[in-house]
Amino acid sequence: MSTNNPEAIQSIDPDAQSAPSADPLDVLRAGLSEPEFAPIVNALKIPIPGEGSVPARPRGIDVALILKPLGVDSATLTAAILSDSRFAATLDIKDIEAGYGAPVANLVRNVRWLNTFNVYSRDVIHNPNQAEILRRMLLAMVDDVRAVLIKLAYRVERLRKLSQEDDAIRHYIARETLELYSRLANRLGIRQLKWELEDLAFRYLNPQIYRKLADSLIESRSTREAYVNRFVAILGHRLEEENIDAEIYGRPKHIYSIWKKMQRKQVDFKDVYDLRAVRVIADKVSTCYSILGIIHGLWHYVPQEFDDYIANPKTNGYQSLHTVVVGPDGAMVEIQIRTAEMDQFAELGIAAHWRYKEGRNHDKTATKSIEALRRLLDNREDDQHLLDDFRTDLYTDRIFVLTPNGELKELPRGATPLDFAYSIHSEVGHRCRGAKVNQRIVPLTYLLQSGEQVEILTSRNGTPSRNWLDPHLGYLNTPGARSKVRHWFRKRDHERNLRDGKAILEKQRLLTGIPEVDKSALIRHFRLSGFDELLIAIGRADISPGQLKDALLPPGKNDDFLDITPVRKTAPSPAPARNDITVHGVDNLLTAIAQCCKPISGDPIIGFISGSKGIVVHRKSCRNIKELPSQKHNRLVEVDWGENPRAHAVEVLVRAIDRTGLLKDITHILANEQIHILEATSRSNSNHHTVTINLTLELIDTAQLDRTLERINQLPHIVAVARRD
């Protein structure tokens, strides 16, 4: 039977005067050989620039003294001393490497990066997801986790001296500590640093509540210690009678954790059960349940406070028996019962408080890395293998990048700017035409790295490209982004098929001469669930025009029914040899295409009777037509395209992010569409890395134009493409 005299409360008071301590050099020397201790002594001999000018700034030696109880190695202690921010301007990393070796220099480099890392903001305070991503980013960016330990120790020392700062700085640093650094300490399983970080930060954020709780704990401290000692003795004696060997001890309590429990359970200080808290460590699972039975036999338990996390582990793997009993004199006592293996599981961080209290999923990678960290800290030798484990395992499958506004985004490693765009919003991804990383234009296939700032360049009318779905081209590497692109094409194809189906059905109705389509009969005939499904099936050619014709024909009619030609009010004029334009009511007139708007077949058009060119054909949307004086409106005539329109010149304007092969890709599309290029000019802007291309193309109709513009618009780095008016 093993019992410990519990320390029921461990609070932090920065204003309290500490007792004289041992010589700092003796503390740092403990457990180190002379060769290990020598670089620490040498580091302490370096004069610190401006020492004493900023009293609140932490000193390297004080930070090293905080780290010493964690069992860190000589390199970490040396790096902690040399990471004093006052050395940043005078002590170069190359000099540190020359004097102390590459591992120490790399640690100092990492700590300096952490010191310059300034993404935390008010937005993070109010956005838990952003705070979590920020914590992960810090761990991912630092290639030696011991640098995080040094940074945490510097933050502890900063908080110890924070009373010398003004209120605004106190509040900001305390809030940042609670949201970021104390949770990092907890995540790494460094409870000593976590508790002090939390209590000090809480003291500055809520000084009145802190002081009230501290006073209450001090007043009840001796009574509580005596009570827990008595409880442990009673339980220990009872377990001895049952020949059960177990370790029993009281668990220390901290002001911030007490306050959090009061808030979570909405209770007063006197009603917090685990002010009197005991932990029992047994040899095996069956013994845990035996001990639980003995405890419940000795004292009444509170049913709603009992949890069996051994039979029903938490999702993160945490296992233990939790119970609250009404102990001697009617006082509540919280008891945790677990095996040594379960306790080690929790102590190594696998079931650390940050996981099961914050409701995170079990992270095997982080678990393995925390175990490696613990073994590294406990190992006196230079275990490079363990250090490599931590470097390569922790969040290696994730990257953390920033938006131009400083918002953090977490993405799988291998993500591209296009993946990033879709992580912001589907529409941003759809309209993406380029990207800047750290203010530099990069291809959309560029692989993003942690810490980079990404800006997405969009086009107002941009649409996705089917090339983005080709895994060999490397545009998209995240399943979510690919899913959004596929959904866009399904939706677009749905709308297009619906539109085409309506047109085909109407055309067949006119050809058959029936006044109205019997929708219900058609749906039954093709065995579909609704009219939209019918139109989509017609539009994507699942139902052929012949099948539709047969379904529309009245019973008893045959194909001769289709030979009936509708009578036109005015017989069409013979198609002019030049432009194949039909002028309503007038035969064989000379026509010409207006050069101001250059209409092509498919454009809504109108004719203007000119003095020398006959009928000049304009688009109805042409500015010259819209601004035509009212006294000339009598010279406008209705015209339409003939059955065999000729090709016409159309000007197209392309704006894009300049890249190699852009013009080649455009001309390849034009060649596939059998479009003749009459003229092509381009103008580059080297300052903005953009290019403007003017094309004069020979096109048949608007359908060919629309199809061509859409295909060009889907090319990488296209910002805008449009017909030029």
Image (spheres, rainbow, N blue to C red):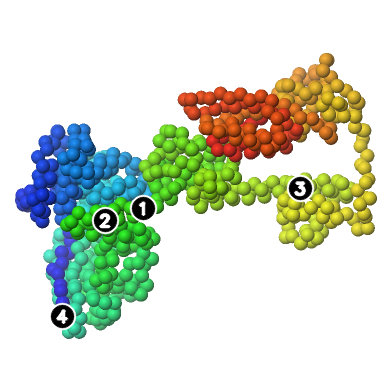
Three-letter code, disc 1 = Tyr
Local crowd size for mark 2, using a 10 Å CA cut-off: few (<14), some (14–19), many (≥20):
few
Local crowd size for mark 1, using a 10 Å CA cut-off: few (<14), some (14–19), many (≥20):
many
Distance from label 4 to label 3 (Cα)? 88 Å
Three-letter code, disc 2 = His
Query: Would you name the residue on which mark 4 appears?
Result: 237
- Circle 2 or circle 3, nearest the eye: 2
The residue at the point 40 percent across, 39 percent down is 453
The residue at the point 46 percent across, 34 percent down is 441
Q: Quadrant of residue 440?
A: top left
Residue 135 in view of the camera = no
Q: Earlier in the sequence, mark 2 or mark 3?
A: 2
Specify the quadrant that holds the N terminus.
Answer: bottom left
Foreground residue among 227 and 236: 236
Q: Earlier in the sequence, mark 4 or mark 3?
A: 4
Vertical placement of residue 526 versus 207, above or below:
below
Vertical placement of residue 268 versus 241, above or below:
above
Query: Would you name the residue on which mark 1 appears?
Result: 395
Three-letter code, disc 3 = Lys
- Circle 1 or circle 2, nearest the eye: 2
Q: Are marks 4 and 2 in contact (CB under 8 Å)?
A: no
- Circle 1 or circle 3, nearest the eye: 1
Foreground residue among 56 and 92: 92
Foreground residue among 68 and 392: 392
State the count of labels. Answer: 4
Distance from label 4 to label 2 (Cα)? 46 Å
